[in-house]
Amino acid sequence: MLTFNAEQHRYFWDGKPVANVTRVLAELTDYSVIPAATLEVARQKGVAVHTMLDLDEKKDLDEETLPDWLKPVLAKWRQFVKETGFVTRASESRVYHPLYKFAGTLDRYGHMAMIGGFAFVDFKRSFLAGKVIGLQLAAYRAAYAEQVPEAKKAVLFALRINENTPVRLKEYNDPACFSEFLALLTAQRIREKYK
């Protein structure tokens, strides 16, 4: 059984810690040039966006309590759904890969009429992480497909969505992404073994 400790941001399978997708990839993106306070504000805003969009999906969002900065984000998401015909099947879902023993939380999985098939959509405030986003999405797809086989062929997208810029949908289709993620996962385990 998969559990998650929000304070530590750690995943556990049957009580034993397992690798976290975002931690496996953490070393690939250099945030050192960004002041710590700026990063913390961005992190908090990211959490707020994810929470709001998940509550909206569950029809449990009290829009009157939203701070002003979140209202345009919600409007942009709803417009995106309308334009792409995206129908959510999974929202903020924790996933686990039983063979490779890693876990994470995917943002959205669903059917997108615009592409005529299934897609993963990961929310990003920016594309600063670049190609690393593709590795993240490939890991989520592999883990989710263990439960939902149709997801193996789903298209991977990141959606830049924030209060200041127009939304932008970017596809990640490099077939090497998952094998590269597994190589990083192996490297992390080797480092931990020899600490």
Image (cartoon, rainbow, N blue to C red):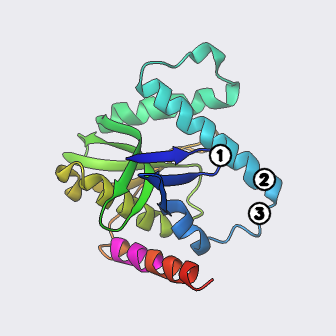
Q: Which residue is identified by label 3?
A: 34
Please name the residue shown 37% across and 34% down the image. Answer: 81
Pointer 1 with pointer 2, Cβ within 8 A:
no
Residue 135 visible in the picture: yes
Q: Against 115, is 79 above or below?
A: above
Q: Which residue is identified by label 2?
A: 38
Position in image of residue 171 (x %, y %): 37, 59
Q: What range is drawn magenta here?
A: 178-184
Q: Against 37, is 172 above or below?
A: below
Q: Report the disc number at residue 81.
A: none
Position in image of residue 123 (x %, y %): 49, 47
Q: Which residue is identified by label 1?
A: 7
Q: Quadrant of residue 31?
A: bottom right
- What kind of element bears circle 3? loop
Residue 115 visible in the picture: no
Please name the residue shown 37% across and 47% down the image. Answer: 1
- What kind of element bears circle 1? loop
Seen from the viewer's position, the closer of residues 165 and 154 is 154
- What kind of element bears circle 2? helix
Magenta run includes residue 36: no
Q: Against 47, is 20 above or below?
A: below
Seen from the viewer's position, the closer of residues 9 and 154 is 9
Position in image of residue 68 (x %, y %): 69, 25
Q: Amino acid at mark 2?
A: Thr
Q: Relative to 41, is 103 on the left or the right?
A: left
Q: Amino acid at mark 3?
A: Ile
Q: Provide the major secondary structure of the magenta segment.
A: helix
Please name the residue shown 24% across and 47% down the image. Answer: 118
Q: Relative to 193, is 112 on the left or the right?
A: left
Pointer 2 with pointer 3, Cβ within 8 A:
yes
